[in-house]
Image: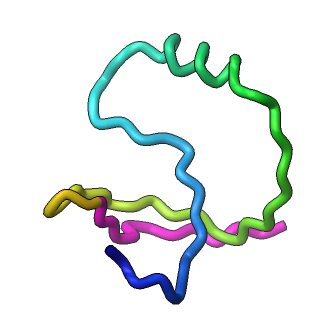
Amino acid sequence: PEPAEPYNPHLSLAYTNTEGPAAPLIDALASAPHLAANAEIDSCQLIILNRDEGMYVWEPYATVKLES
């Protein structure tokens, strides 16, 4: 596993490795509890994701700085 420090908090919005219908995902999200949270996000990354030796490994491909 990656080292515990420094931890780089992240949020994965989606992951897929194949084509398929969106309806089951839309239904699952529609039935999820509506929770709120605040976060300040200053960049967004597109990553290359691999699963080597039974664990996920990723590297940044591109980073976009976000301005408020």
Percent of width and height locating residue 7: 54, 80
Q: Nearer the viewer, residue 9 or 3?
A: 3
Q: Residue at x 52, y 21 (%)?
A: 25
Image point (36%, 78%), residue name:
2
Identify whether 2 is placed above or below 62. Answer: below
Q: Quadrant of residue 57?
A: bottom left
The C terminus: image quadrant: bottom right
- Name the residue rendered at 81%, 31% in the picture: 34
Q: Residue at x 85, y 44 (%)?
A: 36
State the predominant SS element of the stretch in magenta: strand
In x, y percent, where is residue 24?
50, 14
Which is more toward the observer, 28 or 39?
Answer: 28
Task: Report if residue 64 lies within the magenta region.
Answer: yes
Location of residue 66 with respect to 54 vertically, above or below: below
Q: How is the image coloured?
A: rainbow
Marker count (numbered): 0
Pick whichever, 64 or 10, lies toward us: 10
Residue 21 falls within the magenta-colored stretch: no
- Identify the magenta region: 56-68
